[in-house]
Amino acid sequence: MKHKKVIIFDMDGVLIDSVQTSSNYMLERFPTMTEEIGKEILCGNFHDEVEKFKLKNNVKEENPEERELRLAAYQIIKLKCEAYDGVHDLLYNLHKDGYILALNTSAIERNCMPILNKENLAELFDFIGVAEISKSKVEKFKMIEEKYGVTKEDMLFVTDTLGDIREADIASIPTLAVSWGVHDESYFNRESHENFKGIVNSIEELKNFIYKNYSL
């Protein structure tokens, strides 16, 4: 019997080429924001850091109608984003070979499921942890661990942000960073984390890392 291995992915900037789209959205939503501030926000928990930014910059709260119009407009724009080259083959092969695939994303369901369905990827994930489940990725790591009854050594999280690395480290989840998302190597090397396994620069490197270090 094969030993269970759970590969957990962040979505935006790892699987879906949506970094610039998300950045443009944040800059439009918050006139005082810059791209650099946006990147710094992603050095922590996204939802917590956005609330801190709003408080610091006296951002007025939206009424429900305004919020709905904004989210609906962004959903349409984001749906135009596509998976990075090689993502389909990677996920289909991992799924076929018996790996359990999970998603741990800060995105809300309406900005996650439509694009996964459009790219024919949703069915490959056994667990899809959107923001409605919890805004804390730490909590969702615990859910995944309990759901599958695996040890932390049998889990791998793949992300593109320092904030995710920090949350994964709190949960003691081995984590691998990709270089094609929001943060580059300079962010990942700001500090050391016990469970950080390194950086990969291509889907091929990511595939090789998983099959070499998490063989079934």
Image (cartoon, rainbow, N blue to C red):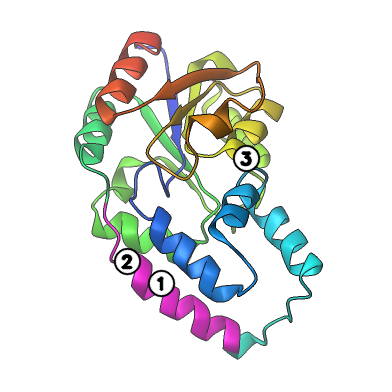
Res. 61 in view: yes
Q: Real-space Cα distance between discs 1 and 2?
A: 6 Å
Residue 43 highlighted magenta (yes or no): no
| Residue contact between numbered discs 1 and 3, judged by CB atoms under 8 Å | no
Q: Residues within 10 Å of mark 3 (few under 14, many from 20)?
A: many
- Disc 3, SS: helix
Query: Does 72 appear in magenta?
Result: yes
User: Looking at the rendering, which quadrant does residue 85 occupy?
Assistant: top left
Which residue carries the number 1 mark? 75
Going by the numbered disc 1, the residue's amino acid type is: Gln
Report the amino acid beneath label 2: Leu
Quadrant of the drawing holding the C terminus: top left
> What is the x, y in percent for residue 212?
33, 9
Q: Quick one: 52 or 16, which is closer to the camera? A: 52
Q: Which residue is mark 2?
A: 79
User: Magenta part mainly helix, strand or loop?
Assistant: helix
Q: Which residues are magenta?
A: 66-82
Residue 198 is left or right of residue 196, and the answer is: left
x and y, in percent, of residue 172 in the image: 66, 22
- The reply to whether dot 1 and dot 2 touch (C-beta < 8 Å) is yes
Name the spot of residue 98 as percent of width and height, x first: 30, 23
Residue at the spot of label 3: 163
Dot 2 lies on which element? Answer: loop
On screen, 16 above or below 26? above
Horizontal side of residue 148 vs 2, given as left or right = right
